[in-house]
Amino acid sequence: MVDQMVLTTQQWLNKTYGSVANYIQVTESGNTGWQTIYGLIQGLQYELGISLQAGLPAFGEVTSAAFDSQVVPQLKNGYESHFVYLIQGAFWAKGINPGEFNGVYSPDTQAAVETLQTEAGFTDPSGILTSLWAKALFDMSAFVLLSNGDAKIRTMQQYLNFRYSAQTGILPADGVYQRDTNTALIYGVQIELGLVTVANGVWGPSTRSTYASAYANGLSTGLIRLVQFALYVNMSQYITANQLSTVPFNGQLDTTTQSLLFAFQRFMNLTPVTANQPDPVTMYSLMVSSGSPSRNFWGVDTSIQLTANMVQSLVNWDATYVARYLTGSVGSGSLQKPKNLTRTEAQNILTAGLHLVPIYQDNFPTVDYFTRRQGQKDARAAMAAATELGLPTGTVIYFAIDMDMTDDDISNNGLPYFNGVTSIFNNGEAANYYVPAVYGTRNVSSRLALESSSVYSYVSNMSTGYSGNLGFSQPLNWAFDQFAEDDSGISGVAAIDYVNVSHADEGVVALETPVQLSWIFNTEFAPLKSAYLSGSLTWDGPEITLYDNKLLKLTAQLTTSISSGPGMLQFNISAGQLEDGFEASLSNAFGQEVSTKLGAKLADMAAAIDNGLLKMTYSASGTEVSISCTLINSQSEINGVEMSSAIILNASFHLNPLNPSDSPDWQKINNAIYNITMAGAVSSVSADAGYLVYAAILAGAAPVATVTLGIGAVGLLLVATWNQINDNS
């Protein structure tokens, strides 16, 4: 929606400063945003006599000093200048009404200043717009509770502004915990500890040692209130999920606060700590996602392929869990080394009594990498590696999203990627084979648990600077907590990460017989994969029945003897993609509705094939309609030998009328049969096509050869086949 006053501001900026060197034109849209803010800052700097520089402007120290000396003394009722236009425009952009846009400072303008100060947390606003406030005004910071904000977080932000803004500046008070809020919280602790001159918003050695002394001597009310702030931020999800009393912000170490401190210590599995108290180890974990690197832990992860001696070193070091990568390498060029877990290594780990935790990461992560199709590809690669290692049914595999994804990144990339993973893992027999989980920040882990189907989380808490770890609760489903990196390693193991455990996932404790997966596992064809796993379907073995009832019989065969004959429909496959235009060909043959449903399934099947062919045929004879689909892989490996191979699926539709016991829809089908018989022609039927095609076949009023059964009708039957395969209905 266009805001007329924002539009007026944008037009005035361009008209007034459009000819000034390095001024960046503002889009006149009536919508606020950084472009408008930058235009306001540039206008302010020009009026202050500061030459505009190329690039985006900043409200820095020079601008602040000039504002305090040139503008603040003039801001009285009736003062008229371009400065006031800019201030009024900034208020309109902020969503605060300054009364007019006329360049005249008035009681309404001062009231807007007081509103800003009140919303930021100052209960007795001065109404004086110093550079401290102007910097917050000429910014996109929000000072009202946003729709995704938390009222208690906003209360915290307002308190931090009121108490510590001389050191931190005026920070957003919108209810959304962010990097600046986290920094201000640490600033607050440092100031309460008396470290005003060295306060920097970093939980460093001096702050930690001073806090330890303060804790030993009794914490002040101000420090306890900041402890309560941090406790709420870290426990908000836990409190909601467990229906606990919330954290009071009263500066008292009361019963509720102590109870929640104990819950936090237990939830995070922190040791050694003083129960119910904000001792130094507990406070470290409240202030920084990693927590103390000297706290107890039971797990490690490493990219190094472990020898038996290295494994014994981990045992001697009292490690219990070892996380290793299923595939890939580290380094580049002459320094490149494999990081993939081997069968011998896995056996050595388990023989030593350690628990094995598999991670899949075979990429240099960028946002663009994470797509649904990439998730499917990675899931297939992980499953192939896991079965070849002999990882047992039920093993949890953690897929790495090892980067600082924003909320938008998670929505647009992280979730589609993980949904791609789960589309493979949660499909048919894979749902009982391996369990999908995520390695990532607190935000990534929590959102994938809530919005997808990540069962457990391996949390990258040692990335303390990641926005996805700032102000987010530890995921409720956390299994592993990676909190420190040790480049010096231990005896024989050059580099490891420290990992705490919740015991939600105990990892792998025994191996099974390795299985080398065929390329058929790169399809999304659950019944076929299940039959292959069970051993009933083998290469060049007999044709087997996957599904059979009174309407439909579906069979499958795996063969290396491929017929050279053409199909009625035929499509090339390259790099997992069906040839361009295959959707149009399907649409021409089967109609748009059928081709849309069928095309997606065929594309998923083709994803398994780097170079090959899809052939489809159908026939109608006697009392049966048959449809055949052949997927040919020209570059497959069967039993260690490279050759062409194919999956052949045959669907036969039987012309047998249904009885009430055959289907809950028998009456609907029989009604369709009656309508078909009365109409006398299949081609005249359009409504409820799936049932009517069945009805046409079942009517039996004439031999199939005389029934008008076009390829579109066969297409509908093929869609029904796919529905039977996927729904098992």
Image: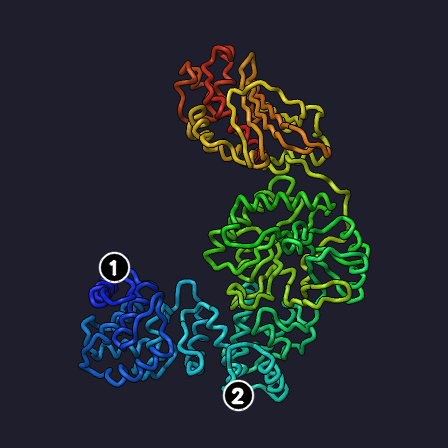
Residue 210 in the image: x percent, y percent?
Answer: 59, 85
Q: Residue furthest front?
A: 334
Image-based side of 428 in relation to 370, left or right: right
User: Can the viewer see residue 378?
Assistant: yes
Give amino acid for label 1. Answer: Glu
Look at the numbered discs 1 and 2 and tell me whether their residues touch, using CB distance below 8 Å: no
Q: Nearer the viewer, mark 1 or mark 2?
A: 1
User: Can the viewer see residue 243?
Assistant: no
Residue 162 numbered mark, or none: none
Q: Residue at x 54, y 68 (%)?
A: 465
Residue bearing mark 2: 194
Q: Residue at x 22, y 77 (%)?
A: 108
Image-based side of 62 in relation to 625, left or right: left
Residue 279 in the image: x percent, y percent?
Answer: 63, 79
Residue bearing mark 1: 28
On screen, 48 above or below 486?
Answer: below
Report the front residue among 13 and 75: 13
Q: Secondary structure at mark 1?
A: loop
Q: Secondary structure at mark 2?
A: loop
| Image quarter hosting the C terminus | top right
Label 1 to label 2: alpha-carbon separation: 49 Å
On screen, 523 above or below 33?
Answer: above
Crowd rating for badge 1 (residues with CA inside 10 Å; few <14, some 14–19, many 20+): some
Report the front residue among 612 and 119: 612
Residue 424 in the image: x percent, y percent?
Answer: 59, 42
On screen, 610 above or below 702?
Answer: below
Tally of numbered discs: 2
Residue 3 in the image: x percent, y percent?
Answer: 25, 61
